[in-house]
Image: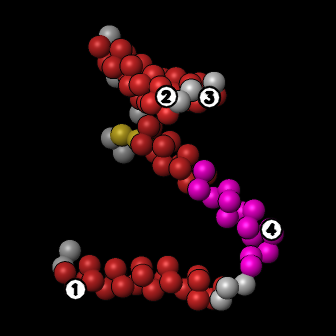
Amino acid sequence: MSWLALVVLSLGSLALRSLGPVLAGGRPLPPRVRALTELLPPALLAALVAVQALEGDGGIVVDARVPALAAAAIAVWFRAPFLVVVLVGVAVAAGLRALGVG
């Protein structure tokens, strides 16, 4: 990619991100729109996690990452601290890989 393309795309991204506050003009969002925008970050994060956990070789791959993600999700369900959630996922993935799964 050329530097010119990089600069043009960066400026386009900046202009697009600046458009929202300019158009809103300090007006409060309607309650329905505000509720929708509050739901977007968790949905996007879940989608990113799913893509990272299941993607491989151009398709869906089920390996040690999937049970590790499930174990981490169970730890979250039980309201474990973040570090414990990460360690549970790492331990499950490492254990399964040591056993030759994934």
Which is more foreground, mark 2 or mark 4?
Answer: 2
Disc 3 target residue = 79
Q: Residue at x 42, y 81 (%)?
A: 14
The alpha-carbon separation of the residues under discs 2 and 4 comes to: 33 Å
Q: Residue at x 63, y 24 (%)?
A: 78
The alpha-carbon separation of the residues under discs 2 and 3 comes to: 9 Å
Where does the magenta region start and end? 28-42
Q: Which x, y percent locates residue 64?
A: 39, 24
Q: Quadrant of the C terminus?
A: top left
Q: Residue at x 42, y 79 (%)?
A: 13
Residue 70 visible in the snapshot: no
Say if mark 2 contacts mark 4, CB within 8 Å: no
Q: Residues within 10 Å of mark 2 (few under 14, many from 20)?
A: many
- Is 90 situated left or right of 35 in this image? left
Say if mark 3 contacts mark 1, CB within 8 Å: no
- Hey, what amino acid is under mark 2? Val
- In which image quadrant can residue 54 be found? top left
The alpha-carbon separation of the residues under discs 3 and 4 comes to: 29 Å
Which is more foreground, mark 1 or mark 2?
Answer: 2
Magenta region's main secondary structure?
helix
Label 4: which secondary element: helix
Disc 1 target residue = 4
- Mark 3 or mark 4: whose residue is earlier in sequence: 4
- In which image quadrant can residue 74 be found? top right
Which is more foreground, mark 4 or mark 1?
Answer: 4
Q: Which mark is residue 85?
A: 2
Disc 4 target residue = 32
- Hey, what amino acid is under mark 3? Arg
